[in-house]
Amino acid sequence: MLDIIRGIRLSSEQMVGVDAAINPDNRVVKIESPAGSGKTLLTEAIIWNFHNMGMKGKGLAFNYGAAKSLRKRGLPSSCAFTTYHGLARSRLSPNNAKRIGHLSPWQVIKVLGLTYFAGGTPLSQAYLILESLDRWGNSSDRLLEPVHVTGESLGVMRERGGANADFIAHIVRKARELWNHVWSPGSILNIPHTFYLKQWARKSGNMGLDYVIVDEAQDLNPVVLGWLRKQRSKIVLIGDSNQQIYAWRGAIDALQAMDFDEEIWLSRSYRFGQPVADVATDIISGGLGSDREIIGNPDVESEVIVGRDDVYDTFIARYNSSLFTKLAEEDCRVRVLGSAGTMKRILEAVIKLQQGKPCAHELLSHFSTWGEVEQFARTKVDGEIGRLVNVVNRHGAGGLLEAFERKVVESGYDLTLATAHGSKGLEFDYLRLADDFPGLKDSRNEEVRLLYVAVTRAKHRLSVPANVKLKSVTPLAGLSGQLTSSPS
């Protein structure tokens, strides 16, 4: 068995994972790999051992960046590592492949001839149609039904007295009509990524592979899970159920959904020392009821601060509104990870509403003026719109946009800003969390998992808000608490 990859010897835990994966008696193997536990190295080792056994297969990554990172490590030609969409895209005809792209709500309005219907503006209908097709496209369901017409924008409409049964049926009809438009012969409409993924999964069967390795298996599209169940090959699922953060858009934890022959748990993280590991264990035990313990790296010095801390190079928040506030307050060059485009688009939408113009934004398209948004926010102070109204009224949309355009850079930055979702898969030396994460006792499971993802990005210094209420470290005199480890 190959146990050294790129000059690095695998740990005993990682070797147990490799042994389970290549065991001919196991068809489905599940490997739970906590943050920083060397999942990429383990994946490489499994692929190289399959290669030495004469086996050919596919590796499926959650996104393009992860797939590219693995390919750059010099994997054998017997394994093609790609994304779910990359696999589906390779099955498109040349003409359809040229049409891959975004469908704007304005295109939808024109193609479907949308007009005002049951209180819904053409723009709000277009967004709901696209959102419904996206939710159906990511599901394993054969037909698009009213159950797929859901999401935050529908909630906004309902709270404003709209979205009755006739309206929902109208959205379903128009969504089906748009799907048929896209796939009709001679169509020149763009094909969104969700569309061709759904089309591929519906038509694709067993690919005759020796094995399939699935990375980030805790957040698998139901449509991909359906395809995976059609395969007759060995399946290796690698991920961390505690990091499932996309259930809100329909993702399924394949580590829990699929039957398996052997389960492996990696306990040691090489990213951080024991204090950060203790915080991570606190979160999954106190918030998720897990009996797993995460072990830190004795060779990494880490410390945890509870309360205000001014030593950090990265700031992670639960909501974009907290990033807006931080951007307004800091007088330095800032890098925004993952949500820079979204943040700018929100501000531009707010300014249009303040000018009395319609805006192209999923949630805000249901309003005609900024005054309507403010009125709605009075009943939803803790919602996304309520938080947005608070930060805009405090700093001004124009001022926030000016700060964004002046301070946000891609290189030469002093501070990194990210939401918990945008920080997934990354690590930072000195990390401070915003105070918009709810406490463990007040959180739904997905909120707890988001907090776990956020804290496990830290390497050397982690600052957490006092409201999280951790067992592993207690605030001192109501101000701050500290726990430090040194390399052994």
Image (cartoon, rainbow, N blue to C red):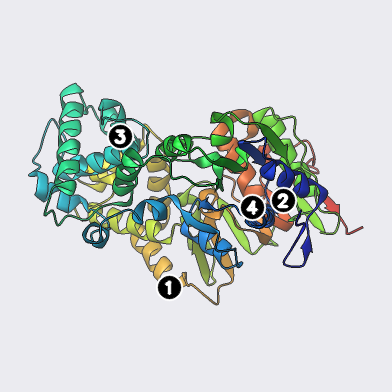
Residue 19 falls in image quadrant: top right
Q: Earlier in the sequence, mark 3 or mark 4?
A: 4
Which residue is farthest right? 488
Q: Which residue is mark 1?
A: 406
Mark 1 belongs to which amino acid? Arg
Query: Is residue 268 in view?
Result: no
Give the residue furthest to the top: 165
Q: Are marks 1 and 2 in contact (CB under 8 Å)?
A: no
Which residue matches tag 4? Answer: 50
The label nearer to you, 3 versus 1, is 3
Kind of residue at badge 3: Val
- State the residue at coordinates (50%, 47%): 209
Q: Earlier in the sequence, mark 1 or mark 2?
A: 2
In front: label 3 or label 4: 4
| Horizontal side of residue 63 vs 105, given as left or right | right
Can residue 350 be seen here? The reply is yes
Amino acid type for the residue under numbered disc 4: Phe
**Which numbered disc, 4 or 2, marks the residue that appears first in the sequence?**
2
> Which secondary structure, mark 2?
loop
Residue receiving disc 2: 37
Q: Mark 3 or mark 1: name the one nearer the start of the chain.
A: 3
Give me the C-alpha separation between circle 3 and circle 1: 33 Å
Q: Position of residue 381 (x, y in %)?
A: 42, 36
Label 1 – label 2 distance at C-alpha: 38 Å
The residue carrying mark 3 is 156
Q: Secondary structure at mark 1?
A: helix
